[in-house]
Image (tube, rainbow, N blue to C red):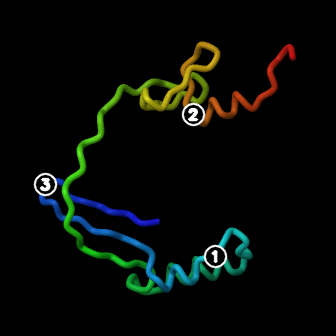
């Protein structure tokens, strides 16, 4: 996973990526609990330069995201951006909740 962080007012930006050494240590989800613990300890103990590659970069500012209204999910009661809300059985429901509701068996079937 790679992140780019930018200060809009100055145009300064940094790109943060896993180092090649970290990429070599990363394995699939079949990692044993012992190996996972070793990886965590390595991440905590290693110098920053062994874990991450951090580069200053030049980039044009991206446009600001459109601010949308927040709507409360009728299942979990969390506020959700209106473009991420779904209507399920006539109620406003967030995507994670609608996925749960759609997996439940329908009554009367």
Q: Is residue 43 left or right of residue 109?
A: left
Q: Which residue is mark 3?
A: 9
Label 1 vs 2, first from the N-terminus: 1
Q: Residues within 10 Å of mark 3 (few under 14, many from 20)?
A: few
Q: CA distance from mark 1 to mark 2?
A: 30 Å
Front residue of 107/43: it is 107
| Residue at 60% across, 80% down | 39
Q: How many marks?
A: 3
| Residue at 24% across, 59% down | 6
* Disc 3 to disc 2: CB gap under 8 Å: no
Label 3 vs 1, first from the N-terminus: 3
Q: CA distance from mark 3 to mark 2?
A: 34 Å
Mark 3: secondary structure: loop
Q: Which residue is mark 2?
A: 95
Front residue of 31/36: it is 31
Mark 1: secondary structure: loop
Q: Quadrant of the C terminus?
A: top right
* Disc 3 to disc 1: CB gap under 8 Å: no
Q: Is residue 82 left or right of residue 105?
A: left
Mark 2: secondary structure: helix
The percent position of residue 17, horizontal first and vertical second, equals 40, 72
Q: CA distance from mark 3 to mark 1?
A: 39 Å
Q: Residues within 10 Å of mark 2 (few under 14, many from 20)?
A: some
Vertical arrangement, residue 108 with respect to residue 21, above or below: above
The percent position of residue 10, horizontal first and vertical second, equals 12, 59
Q: Which residue is mark 1?
A: 27
Res. 46 mark: none
* Disc 1 to disc 2: CB gap under 8 Å: no
Q: Is residue 101 left or right of residue 2?
A: right
| Residue at 37% across, 78% down | 53
């Amino acid at each position: 996973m790679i992140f780019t962080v930018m200060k809009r007012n100055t145009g300064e930006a940094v790109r943060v990526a896993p180092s090649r050494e970290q990429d070599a240590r990363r394995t699939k989800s079949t990692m044993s609990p012992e190996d996972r613990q070793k990886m965590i300890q390595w991440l905590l103990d290693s110098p920053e330069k062994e874990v991450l590659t951090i580069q200053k970069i030049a980039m044009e500012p991206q446009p600001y995201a459109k601010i949308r209204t927040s709507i409360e999910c009728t299942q979990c009661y969390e506020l959700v951006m209106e473009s991420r809300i779904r209507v399920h059985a006539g109620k406003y429901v967030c995507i994670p909740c609608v996925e749960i509701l759609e997996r439940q068996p329908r009554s009367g079937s």
